[in-house]
Each structure stands twice: as structure tokens, then as C-alpha cells.
Amino acid sequence: MRFALIGLLVVLCSVFELGAQVSTSPRRLSEATITYSVSIRTSNTEPRAADLMDGALNLVYLKGNLSRSDLKSALGHQSTVVDSKTGEATVIKEYGEQRYLIRMTPEEWKTSNKTYDSVRYQFTGISKQIAGYTCEQAIGTWKDGNTYTVFFTRALLPINHEFQYLNRNLPGLALEYQAKLGKGELTYTATSINFDPVPHQQFELPTSGYRVMTYEESKGGRKQ
């Protein structure tokens, strides 16, 4: 009887340990809709166009290797659609009557984000709750010495990191982070995460009504 009780305790301990491992294992995030609210902090005393970003919404759609990030503000609407499998990206801009569709090759997409390739993180040990998840604080530093603050959760691990190139090297999903805009600083904070299936139509590109440009043309260069 004694040995039987000992055996039962060993089994129970193993079950509890396995349950703890399962509960703490990150969820691989392959499909979701994430909503971020956007606020701006600036030292300007006079209103600027950038101030119109305050109160903006950033909707992120994930589906396998596809991602779409929609930034909606008083200034207008900008979307970035990325296929992480091919590396190609498309930026869609709608500001008033100006409508542009900018196609980018994998090399151009990387070039446009090269500032973020060298980010190194220092984990501070500070944590807080965001959208129902425990998030850790990290300070990201680039080669030029500039820094930014990000809170991320290890509970969700995106399989596609291209939708937030800035945070692509984090060991989890960024639920609050900073981004520079001129002399101001934007803060993106997740308010909800929906795991319902995302329609494939979300990633379809418009076929008319936009001026199609290359990446070089969008920077003011000439088409090669």
C-alpha cells in the first residue's frame, strides 16, 4: 500500500507539472485581428499635422504568411500588406483625394526598414497588464543610439513577424510600443485581440482608383 501511494503521488506530480508546462506554453499566433489605439506626445505648443494622429486606430490582420496593417487617422488612411513568404510588400495611401499604391520588392521592403534590423533589447523586469495579457517591458536600442520602449507578452508568439518590423526580434507579441513621428512620439497600445478567422479578402489589393508607384518613385526618384 505504501509503495502504491508513493507511485500515485509521482503520477499526480507529473500530471501537475505537465499541466503547468501546457498553461505557460506560448500560443503560436497565426490568425488574429489586433486593434491598437494611437496617442501622440509632442513638445510643440502649436498644433501640427502630426497632432491629427492622436486618437488614431491601427488594425492589424494576420493570416498565415499574410499581414495587413491599417492606420486610420484624421489625416487619412494608410495600409501596408506584406506577404512574408515572398517578401513583397504593398503600401496603400489615401489622404484626401490623393490615392497611391506603392509596390515594394523584398529588397526594397528590407531597405525601407533597415533602421530596425540592429535593435538590441534590454529587459527591465517591469511588467503590466495590457488587453488581458501580462507584458514585460524592454528597451530597444538601435546602432545610432536611439531607444524606444516596448511592452510585449510571451503568451503569444507570432509566426509572421513582418507586420511590425520594428518588433520582429522580440520573443513574443508587442502590445504597446513607441514610434517616432518627426519631433513627436507615437504610442501604440493594444485594446483587443480577436482570434476569429480573417477573410482572405482583407489582403486583396485594389485594381483601380489609385496611382501605382514604385518604391523609388515614392521617394521622389525616377523610375528605372
Image (cartoon, rainbow, N blue to C red):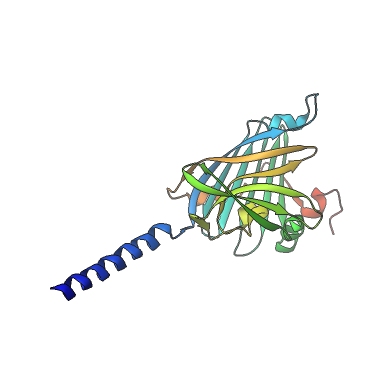
Quadrant of the rendering where the N terminus is positioned: bottom left
Q: Is residue 28 above or below residue 139?
A: below
Q: Residue at x 85, y 48 (%)?
A: 220
Q: Position of residue 68 (x, y in %)?
A: 59, 49
Q: Which residue is nearer to you in this view: 198 or 39?
A: 39
Q: Which residue is nearer to you in this view: 74 or 28?
A: 28
Q: Position of residue 76 (x, y in %)?
A: 68, 34
Residue 84 in sight from this viewpoint? yes
Q: Is residue 175 left or right of residue 88?
A: left
Residue 207 in sight from this viewpoint? no
Q: Position of residue 222 (x, y in %)?
A: 87, 53
Q: Is residue 150 above or below residue 46?
A: below
Q: Which residue is nearer to you in this view: 191 or 221?
A: 191
Q: Residue at x 34, y 61 (%)?
A: 19
Q: Is residue 97 left or right of residue 130?
A: right
Q: Position of residue 80 (x, y in %)?
A: 65, 49
Q: Is residue 205 left or right of residue 52?
A: left
* Quadrant of the image occupied by residue 224: bottom right
Specify the farthest residue to the front: 2
